[in-house]
Amino acid sequence: MKAHGLLLYLPPSLYLALIRLQADKGLGRSFAGLLALTEGLYRLGYLEEKEYTRLRKRYSIPLKEVIVTYNAEEQLPPFKEALEEWDKRDKEWKLKWVRIAMKYPKVEEAQIIIEKAKEEGILVSGAIEACEA
């Protein structure tokens, strides 16, 4: 554990309130928790106004990019298998996988497929070339 780290186990009511705060303000998980802690400590009189203002400003910054995660319940396309077959397949098959991969910008294997397509000239600066066999 880090020197100033703090692991908290929240009861369901506090956890749900924290998740609502996170969603309402567009914050990351840590910033939502730190903002709630800052607000509470200030209202209880344990933080001076200058420090409260600084921390509130810092922890109120929303995420710049929404983080997309894929859970186990969501079935991802079999990118690993597609990569194994890549060199054995024709251009039309590869185009199909490039289109699928473009829908998953956060999946590493999908990005590898896109890079391979760029190297082979199938994908040119973000546009898929017309496939004429």
Image (cartoon, rainbow, N blue to C red):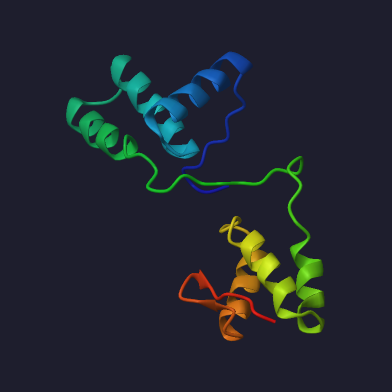
- Is residue 108 visible from the viewing direction of this image? no
Residue at point 25% right, 36% down? 57
Residue 100, given in percent of the width and then of the height, sits at 66, 60
Residue 50 vertical position relative to residue 102 in the rendered view, above or below: above
Q: Percent x, y for residue 68?
A: 56, 46
In the foreground, 40 or 108: 108
Relative image position of residue 69 (x, y in whole percent): 61, 46
Q: Quadrant of residue 71?
A: top right
For the C terminus, the image quarter is bottom right
Q: Is residue 104 left or right of residue 53?
A: right
- Number of numbered discs: 0
Is residue 46 visible in the rendered image? The answer is: yes
Residue at 45% across / 39% down in the picture? 28
Q: Residue at x 59, y 22 (%)?
A: 10
Relative horizontal placement of residue 100, taking residue 41 as reference (left or right): right
Q: Point out residue 115 in the picture as x, y percentages from the top left corner.
A: 59, 76
